[in-house]
């Protein structure tokens, strides 16, 4: 499942454009993807839970309701955000402003996750042992894939993967980065104290927490409201780790990552910022069109 504290966002002063890229996925088919969101979300969840026919029927119906809620309540917020980011795009940005926007986007993601809690709480008591084991296997596969990407290889190879990932997302918004900007990205990312071992431990904690929560909710006598509360608590723990050491680590690298985004934006040319504004305008147009069923 996607993933804070509520914050007051000063729209006109924030431009964490690369973070917006994470939220929107950098996809040119935003309207098509959003319109098909219930189906895409269903297939994503089914890949983890392997729903039976009755569970599938319930989940598909609930995802349609969630989608209607998101279109009505969340898309207008995103539209306003994109509009104000266009105003701010020509201005310098501070790391604090980037982090504020990132926190806001996480808040919106958590809100959506919480709205799915009643559906998951209703299905949890119907999960069979084989479905729980299927969930374990899918999470194990995800961990193996993460290890392959962020732990296999030399430190230089892993660092280059991080550079490539950031550059691809940045160029979707700004256009092609020049040689000095590429050097800036490498230098800035080198200062981010990314620790794959710490990240993996936290990922495994989330996986174990997820499996444990759904196992605890399988007995059919669990009160519905308690089950919903447990699911919401699981969503919250996926965002705010209960581990003090990881919270300290995450706070540190978040601040460092926000500094990377700010430094890159502040290095951009007038032409690159114009490209940014045009891209944000296109996304705003998408959000406006999608706000109407």
Image (cartoon, rainbow, N blue to C red):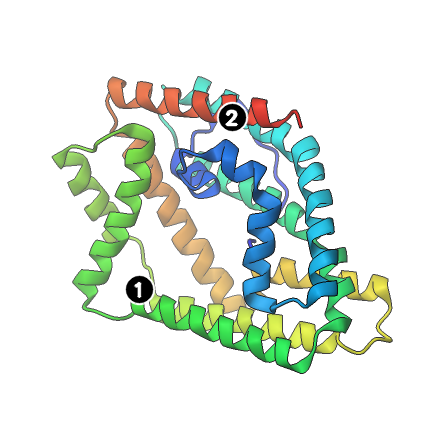
Q: Position of residue 4 (x, y in %)?
A: 60, 50
- Residue 166 figure quarter: top left
Residue at 19 percent across and 61 percent down: it is 157
Q: Position of residue 71 (x, y in %)?
A: 66, 33
From the image, which quarter does the C terminus lie in? top right
Q: Residues within 10 Å of mark 2 (few under 14, many from 20)?
A: some
The residue at which mark 2 appears reads as 286
Q: Is residue 232 above or below residue 79?
A: below
Residue at 54 percent across and 41 percent down: it is 105
Q: Is residue 231 above or below residue 138?
A: above
From the image, which quarter does the N terminus lie in? bottom right
Q: Is residue 32 left or right of residue 211?
A: left
Residue at 63 percent across and 75 percent down: it is 131
Q: Is residue 14 above or below residue 231?
A: above
The answer for how far apart the CA atoms under marks 1 and 2 are is 32 Å
| Disc 1 to disc 2: CB gap under 8 Å | no
Disc 2 on helix, strand or loop? helix
The residue at which mark 1 appears reads as 149
Q: Position of residue 244 (x, y in %)?
A: 53, 67
Q: Residues within 10 Å of mark 1 (few under 14, many from 20)?
A: some
Q: Residue 115, can we see it?
A: no
For discs 1 and 2, the disc positioned in front in the rendered view: 2
Q: Is residue 58 left or right of residue 113?
A: right
Residue closest to the eye, 267 or 40: 40
Q: Mark number for residue 261?
A: none
Disc 1 on helix, strand or loop? helix
Q: Position of residue 285 (x, y in %)?
A: 51, 21
Q: Residue 92, can we see it?
A: yes
Q: Is residue 39 left or right of residue 14?
A: right
Name the residue at the front extreme: 53
Mark 1 and mark 2 lie on one chain; the one further toward the N terminus is 1
Residue closest to the eye, 36 or 81: 36
């Amino acid at each position: 499942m996607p993933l804070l504290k509520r914050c007051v966002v000063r729209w006109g002063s924030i431009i964490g454009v690369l973070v917006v890229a994470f939220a929107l996925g950098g996809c040119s088919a935003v309207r098509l993807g959003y319109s098909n969101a219930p189906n895409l979300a269903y297939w994503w969840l089914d890949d983890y839970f392997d729903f039976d026919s009755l569970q599938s029927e319930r989940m598909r119906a609930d995802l349609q309701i969630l989608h209607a809620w998101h279109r009505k309540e969340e898309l207008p917020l995103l539209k306003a955000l994109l509009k104000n980011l266009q105003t701010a795009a020509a201005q310098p940005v501070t790391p604090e402003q980037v982090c504020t926007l990132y926190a806001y986007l996480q808040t919106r993601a958590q809100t959506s996750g919480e709205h799915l809690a009643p559906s998951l709480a209703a299905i949890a008591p119907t999960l069979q042992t084989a479905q729980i084991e299927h969930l374990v296997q899918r999470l194990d596969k995800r961990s193996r894939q993460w290890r392959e990407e962020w732990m296999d290889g030399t430190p230089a190879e892993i660092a280059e993967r991080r550079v490539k990932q950031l550059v691809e997302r940045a160029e979707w918004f700004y256009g092609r980065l020049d040689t000095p900007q590429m050097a800036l990205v490498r230098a800035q990312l080198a200062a981010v104290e990314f620790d794959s071992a710490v990240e993996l431990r936290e990922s495994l904690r989330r996986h174990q927490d997820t499996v444990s929560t759904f196992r605890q909710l399988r007995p059919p006598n669990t009160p519905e409201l308690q089950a919903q509360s447990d699911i919401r608590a699981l969503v919250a723990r996926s965002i705010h780790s209960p581990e003090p050491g990881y919270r300290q680590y995450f706070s540190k690298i978040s601040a460092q990552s926000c500094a990377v985004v700010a430094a890159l934006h502040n290095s951009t040319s007038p032409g690159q910022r114009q490209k940014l504004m045009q891209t944000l305008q296109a996304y705003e147009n998408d959000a406006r069109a999608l706000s109407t069923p």
